[in-house]
Amino acid sequence: MSVAARARCSGELPRSEQLDTSAPRCKAKEDHQGTPAHHAPLAHFERHCPQRGMVMILGLDGYTLVHVAISLIGIGAGFIVLGGFLADARLDGAVHTYFAMAVATDVTGFLFPFNGFLPSYAVGIISLIGLAIAIYAYYAARLAGPWRSVFVISIVATLYLDVFVLIAQTFLKNPALLALAPKQSEMPFVVVQAAALVTFVVLGAVSLSSFRDARR
């Protein structure tokens, strides 16, 4: 890597570029595809600061790693809860874990630097509303009467939203998938998201007919 490139990555510019405000910095604005930098830090840092890119794991800082870990734990617990629905088993431990991790995922998502209202914020708000309904149905209404169905629908819907975001982030962070759908409007991305939606609709319908609040 050249002296100039090393200087940029350390925050210091060569004297010949100190007055050139157009010189690239290690401060992301937008990538060449118009994607907000906080959604695609990896490509920017690898392009301009390869050494710093090596320090960052998959282009994610420590806070983002915690956010991702919480999200994955929540998704895993959500699928366990969903499996309980299909088996007509009430898995209280998995439900508690899912609630905690899903809420933490949404809350930590809002704590990233704000760069305008993004679709991810809308997803987070919808998810929190769904989780609030599910929490009320589970703890306050105790799944009595219609609240059982409300609980199932809320769990399936919020889990789907988490998976929706996971798919979007996977396409964004994986170079091979990013090449297939750089704008996330291309057919590969649409097909995967459509398949996920259909799968959750089917699982939700089966869960409604299978789960009768059985205590195993």
Image (tube, grey):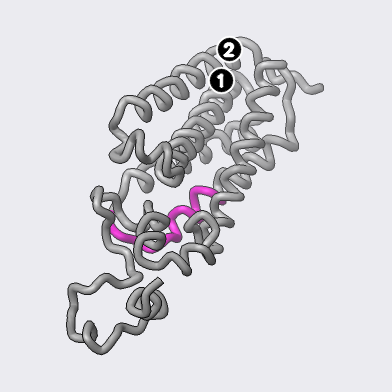
Q: Which amino acid does label 1 sit on?
A: Ser
Tell me, for residue 49, which label it has, or none: none
Residue 157: x percent and y percent? 49, 29
Q: Which of 102 and 30 is in front in this view?
A: 30
Judge from the rendering whether residue 140 lies leftward or rightward of residue 130; answer left or right: right
Q: Does the magenta stretch include residue 105?
A: yes
- Residue at 52%, 24% in the rendered image: 153
Q: Nearer the viewer, residue 70 or 8?
A: 8
Residue range of the region highlighted in magenta in the rendering: 104-116
Camera sees residue 126: no
Q: What residue type is labelled 2?
A: Val
Residue 123: x percent and y percent? 39, 41
Q: Is residue 72 magenta?
A: no
Q: Looking at the rendering, which quadrant does residue 134 occupy?
A: top right
Judging by the rendered image, the residue that carries numbered circle 2 is 206
Q: Element at badge 1? A: helix
Mark 1 crowdedness (10 Å alpha carbons): few <14, some 14-19, many ≥20: many
Q: Looking at the rendering, which quadrant does residue 143 occupy?
A: top right
Give above or below for 79 relative to 5: above
Residue 52: x percent and y percent? 47, 68
